[in-house]
Image (cartoon, coloured by chain):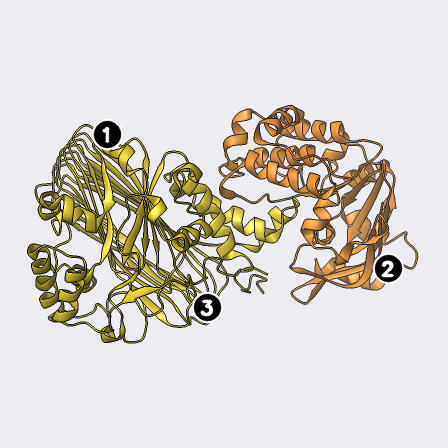
Chain colours: A yellow, B orange
Amino acid sequence: MSNIELLTNREYKYGFVTDIESETIPKGLTEDTIRLISAKKQEPEWMLEFRLKAYRQWLTMKEPRHWPNIKYPEVNYQDVIYYSAPKQKVNKASLDEVDPELLRTFEKLGIPLQEQKQLAGVAIDAVFDSVSVATTYKEKLKKHGVIFCSYTDAIRDYPELVKKYLGSVVPVGDNYFAALNSAVFSDGSFVFVPKGVRCPMELSTYFRINNQESGQFERTLIIAEEGASVSYNEGCTAPKFDKNQLHAAVVELVALDDAEIKYSTVQNWYAGDEEGKGGIYNFVTKRGKCAGRNSKISWTQVETGSAITWKYPSCILQGENSIGEFYSVALTNHSQQADTGTKMIHLGKNTRSTIISKGISAGKSNNSYRGLVKVMPKAEGARNYTQCDSMLIGSRCGANTFPYIEVMNNTARVEHEASTSKISEEQLFYLQQRGISQEDAVSLIINGFCKAVFRELPMEFAVEAQRLLGLKLEGSVG
Amino acid sequence: MLEIRDLHASIEGKEILKGISLSINKGEVHAIMGPNGSGKSTLAKVLAGHPQYVVTKGEVLYEGRNLLEMPPDERAREGIFLAFQYPVEVPGVSNSQFLRLAYNEKQKHLNEEELDPLEFKDLLKERARIVEMDESFMNRSVNEGFSGGEKKRNEILQMAVLEPKLAVLDETDSGLDIDALRIVAGGVNKLRTPENAIVLVTHYQRLLNYIVPDYVHVLAGGRIVREGGKELALELEEKGYDWIKNMGTERSGAVKEKSFMEELQEL
């Protein structure tokens, strides 16, 4: 008989609600809703056209309910608020003008926005419900030619850049949730690193959902011109509500010749309670295009929250010798469900990709890796290495691996390794016999299991990720 | 230091220990010998608190406290160390990271100073000499890819770092070639002090040439069937385990001869 059984999770410490006056629009989604959002954001006509085009496509599409390995009740898209903003509507130039309640909220989340209180060398864009409320170090970055601002500001101040790249990696009709996002997205972050510039600081966006009825539909666009490089991080939390909230984001990355983009995520949305009540539905489309020669895009994700995660950060390897990487830790506990992985599409010659996925399932959760490696006819000499490991804690959870490999060029080399393991009683006993408590032992084993991914994260994020996994599994063995 | 009284223990409903009584004082080295399946390793694991074994009867006092009530990690922090017969691999966790965590847990427990990674590195370097282990082992994952002999040396290294009061070495000699055996035994001898006690669980007398015990206990069928000084091990080596079968027991009252004979045949 196994002694490894599930108990409880520690309180979700980000579950508080900020009491703030918000401006929200009525529930429901029609063309008028979209016109209203666009008007509120004082957008140009071309932006409204983009949204309406996406909306019309969305109406003809079906939610992908069959192929992902997730189960959830029907989402009523008319029962969602598509725009909710604190009274302070715009991203202020000076923090002195930002609502102190918002500053306090982010401080409580461990993300102080006052520059002097921050980690040195990290610039932050803070997104609260539907809007970006503050962006730090904007001026300092501008001196280096780096643009880091809210999407709303980018549409107003850099329309030519936005027009050129918006929807260029994730077309409006790409999938159901991407189409929905394209129609209603309200804000997000915009990054532009010009030719030859190495971004002098880590960039970071912190997403917070506060309103119980509203979804969050943000977009991120990162462009690295020839020879540019940037490291970008995102974090996310939400209050505890009994109801599920919808989060449908789109992230587009573009790397030109010799450019490099490193994108790291630590996702800790509210996961719902033990019985699966409440929590975020996280339906996210993330894709990067290695458009130039020798370019590189690297995704690192640590997914620990959300009731449901549906997410496949991908790379289109178009430029010759371009490199795509995907490092992922996905942890599910209690009733969480995750169907996550990546797509590596090899178009150019000598393109290379690496996929390292670590899935950890506990409780009665279900955790699936789904990955596509596709080598197109012209991708002479393409190479992929995939390693996909699952770890089970207890006997009521599930882990699945769904690899899809399509190779249309016979010079390609594609490797796939997969393993499934359990934390064994012997392993726990061994560590305990050395004086390490059972919970620390679980944490140690899990962190060891995830090492290949954690070492890809920026230092502060790696520490945070390790701590988070420990907390998430606290009491999961007893 | 350790007082075992009429200890009975079973695994999955099958009784393995059928009344063990044993007393160990500080400064002593005890050897527990016996044929395969006699319960030697079970005794070692029960002392360490392995969750699969259930104590059905008897008691164990460790420094006057009821050992059986303590969870395994507390026993360890209180100074009980088990060198595993089959050390476990922990992928992705470096040997030094693991050892520092274990060391600091003990220090914390004793209200003594914890060491940062640099300080600990020095300590580890010094202790590694005891078992002639190369520094490169410290950055490798715990036991992962170690040969059988390296794993056993790593166990003794852990003992050297944690400095237990009571060390139980479960078949530490098995699978070692003669050079490795000499290194491991030499390490254990260096760690022997008047303040600690060592229990050697072994099938063969060979190890006892290097680590000389004060007492030898011979187990069969879950009971102690003979006890004596170091010369008992030699006698056993010479005559083989069949010999105990013919001798029965010299512990009066501890074993009924008939049932003991039956059990031996079951083996």
Query: Element at badge 3?
Result: loop
Mark 2 highlights which residue?
Answer: B255
Which amino acid does the dot numbered 3 rest on?
Asp
Tell me whether the residue at label 3 lies in contact with that at label 2, contact meaning CB atoms closer than 8 angstroms. no
Give the quarter of the image for residue A292.
top left
Of the two numbered discs 1 and 3 on the same chain, state the one appearing first in sequence. Answer: 1
| Chain hosting mark 3 | A
Residue most extreme to the right: B252
Q: Is residue B125 left or right of residue B90?
A: right
Label 3 in the same subunit as label 2? no
Q: Quadrant of the N terminus of chain B?
A: top right
Q: Is residue A287 visible from the viewing direction of this image?
A: no
Image position of A17 with respect to B239: above or below: below
Q: What's the mark number on residue A273?
A: 3
Which amino acid does the dot numbered 1 rest on?
His
The spot of residue A81 in percent (x, y) is 26, 69
| Chain hosting mark 2 | B
Query: Element at badge 1?
Result: loop
**Residue in the foreground of this view, choosing between A332 and B154:** A332
Q: Nearer the viewer, mark 1 or mark 3?
A: 1
**Residue in the foreground of this view, choosing between A372 and A106:** A106
Image position of A64 with respect to A197: above or below: below
Query: How many numbered discs sit on the rendered protein?
Result: 3
**Residue in the foreground of this view, choosing between B132 and A108:** A108
Q: What's the mark number on residue A144?
A: 1
How far, Cα to Cα, is label 3 from label 2?
A: 57 Å
The spot of residue A235 in percent (x, y) is 36, 50
How far, Cα to Cα, is label 2 from label 1?
A: 86 Å
**Residue in the foreground of this view, choosing between B192 and A119:** A119
Q: Nearer the viewer, mark 3 or mark 2?
A: 3
| Residue ID at (56%, 61%) | A4
